């Protein structure tokens, strides 16, 4: 009678792993994917002035163009998140990158406002799937002590991609026109797929849950590549070793996002993410044009916006280390500082140098807070619904993200100007401070075995189960 195959828990392996070359390359590819996602999505704000002139658009029409892309990302995140929890993270990320690459190229050849709107919406369907799925993949390969930081690094790629739109547009648009930046974004996105297919593995935790019976062989091959010092017995059977839902194996329903301790997490997470998205997408879309109205040239306005985005990326990496150690409540210091900057900008009595300093400061604190929020969006959910959890949070946030550019256009068309826009939008970070405080309190009361708990420890049973199969 043959012996039963050894059972290996993946959670202890992930928690004790060291950064190998293949592991680092995986995160580098994730950053490259989100960099291009950020570039392709936010380049519209840098090209908006030229598009408005070419198509004779009003401010509201321009705001609508930004909003329809966000509407596409809202729907796309839900579709791609559902598919990723059923088919896998890797193939759906690849599909999303190919999709937004192709439709970015199509946007470059649009010749009517209707074509712009339609192509922006369809590209948004694919853009919406990239961030929540890369967050899910990054979270499933990162030790809990480093998980928020790992996802923040991925999010920094998105922020830097958006920042790159400024210098790239300054370089290409004067010589080749606004369509050239969309061609560059589309082509680079399509080329990235080859690196992704070569270097980005499927989530081993997903394979352990969903890819039976062939999943064990794939997991062993992936672990051998990511952690060459592990010795795994042939024929080993892998389990996640994480806490699972009581209804594991059933088809996903949104009600699963509110079961047990998630009842106190999901509503707060959705609300703060919605407010943050409304604020950041207002800033991303309208700040370059507001800078022009303040007397800066198009190239100077783009440079200011890019510098602010870089500062935001640095800030979100800084805050992520505190979030890993102290919890989600520490993020509130970022929107609190943003309130001050927004109210100062709303006074409208600043000189050019002081204005630039406060714009960069506002975007730095806004981006830092937004990066912190997005880094925790998928960390509270178990593996079997992680992609859906991140995707639903992202999609709900798109309601705010759609409102931000549109409301900014309405405010400016109404004659309230930059002062009114900055003052009104300061309400968003003010409310975020309160919600993040409440979220931090809820997180501190989570049971130790729950995803996202601050006191999470490796269970001794999991370590014991892993030892017979692994020799280091």
Image (tube, rainbow, N blue to C red):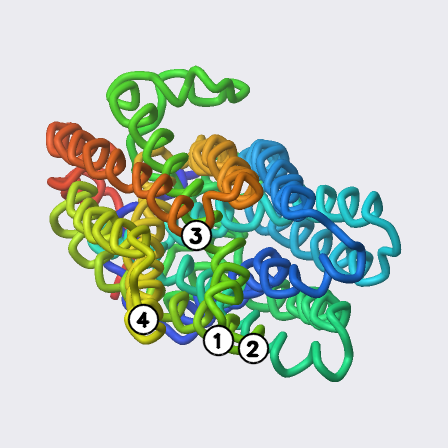
CB atoms of marks 2 and 1 within 8 Å: yes
Q: Would you say 289 lies left or right of 123 here?
A: left
Disc on res. 325: none
Residue 94 in the image: state x and y as whole percent.
65, 54
Marks 1/4: CA–CA distance: 18 Å
Mark 2 or 4, closer to the camera: 4
Pointer 1 residue:
303
Residue 402 in the image: state x and y as whole percent.
55, 38
Of residues 358 and 170, the one nearer the viewer is: 358
Of pointers 2 and 3, the one earlier in the residue sequence: 2
Marks 4/3: CA–CA distance: 14 Å
CB atoms of marks 4 and 3 within 8 Å: no
Can residue 1 be seen by looking at this rendering? no
The residue drawn where x is 21% and y is 39% is 433
Of residues 44 and 463, the one nearer the viewer is: 44
Judge whether 414 appears above or below 156 on screen: above
Q: Residues within 10 Å of mark 2 (few under 14, many from 20)?
A: some
Pointer 3 residue:
418
Q: Residues within 10 Å of mark 4 (few under 14, many from 20)?
A: few
Judge whether 49 appears above or below 397 on screen: below
Mark 1 or 3, closer to the camera: 3
CB atoms of marks 2 and 4 within 8 Å: no
Q: Picture quarter containing residue 239? A: top left
Instruction: Say what secondary structure mark 3 lies in.
Output: helix
Marks 2/3: CA–CA distance: 19 Å
The residue drawn where x is 32% and y is 45% is 373
Of pointers 4 and 3, the one earlier in the residue sequence: 4
Mark 1 or 4, closer to the camera: 4
Of pointers 1 and 4, the one earlier in the residue sequence: 1
Q: Would you say 331 lies left or right of 211 here?
A: left
Q: Picture quarter containing residue 24? A: bottom left
Disc on res. 351: 4
């Amino acid at each position: 009678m043959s012996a039963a195959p050894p059972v290996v828990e993946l959670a202890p392996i992930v928690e004790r792993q060291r950064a190998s070359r293949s592991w680092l390359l995986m995160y580098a590819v994730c950053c490259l994917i989100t960099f291009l996602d950020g570039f392709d999505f936010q380049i519209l704000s840098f090209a908006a002035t030229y598009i408005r002139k070419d198509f004779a658009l009003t401010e509201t029409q321009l705001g609508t163009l930004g909003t329809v892309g966000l509407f596409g990302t809202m729907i796309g995140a839900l579709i791609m998140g559902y598919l990723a929890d059923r088919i896998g993270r890797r193939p759906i990320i690849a599909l999303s990158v190919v999709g937004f690459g192709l439709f970015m190229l199509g946007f470059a050849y649009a010749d009517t406002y209707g074509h712009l709107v339609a192509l922006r919406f369809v590209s948004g369907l694919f853009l919406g799937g990239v961030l929540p799925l890369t967050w899910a993949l990054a979270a499933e390969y990162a030790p809990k002590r480093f998980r928020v930081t790992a996802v923040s690094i991925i999010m920094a790629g998105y922020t830097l991609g958006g920042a790159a739109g400024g210098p790239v547009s300054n370089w290409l648009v004067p010589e080749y026109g606004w369509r050239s930046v969309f061609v560059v974004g589309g082509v680079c996105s399509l080329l990235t797929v080859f690196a992704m297919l070569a270097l980005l593995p499927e989530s081993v935790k997903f394979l352990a849950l969903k890819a039976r019976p062939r999943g064990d062989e794939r997991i062993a091959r992936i672990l051998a590549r990511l952690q060459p010092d592990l010795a795994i017995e042939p024929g080993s059977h892998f389990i996640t070793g994480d806490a699972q839902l009581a209804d594991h194996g059933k088809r996903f329903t949104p009600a699963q996002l509110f079961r047990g301790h998630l009842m106190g997490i999901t509503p707060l997470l959705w609300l703060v993410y919605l407010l943050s998205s409304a604020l950041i997408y207002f800033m991303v879309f309208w700040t370059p044009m507001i800078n022009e109205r303040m007397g800066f040239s198009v190239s100077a306005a783009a440079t200011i916006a890019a510098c602010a985005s870089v500062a935001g990326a640095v800030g979100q990496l800084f805050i992520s280390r505190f979030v890993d150690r102290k919890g989600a409540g520490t993020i509130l210091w970022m929107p609190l500082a943003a309130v001050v900057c927004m109210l100062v900008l709303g006074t409208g009595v600043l000189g050019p140098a002081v204005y630039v300093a406060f714009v960069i400061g506002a975007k730095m604190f806004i981006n830092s807070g937004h990066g912190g929020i997005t880094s925790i969006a998928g960390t509270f959910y178990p593996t079997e619904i992680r992609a859906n959890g991140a995707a639903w949070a992202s999609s709900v946030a798109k309601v705010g993200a759609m409102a931000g550019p549109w409301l900014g256009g309405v405010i400016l068309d109404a004659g309230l100007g930059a002062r009114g826009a900055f003052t009104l939008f300061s309400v968003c970070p003010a409310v975020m401070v309160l919600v993040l405080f409440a979220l931090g309190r809820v997180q501190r009361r989570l049971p130790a075995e729950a995803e996202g708990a601050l006191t999470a420890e490796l269970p001794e049973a999991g370590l014991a189960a892993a030892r017979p199969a692994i020799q280091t």
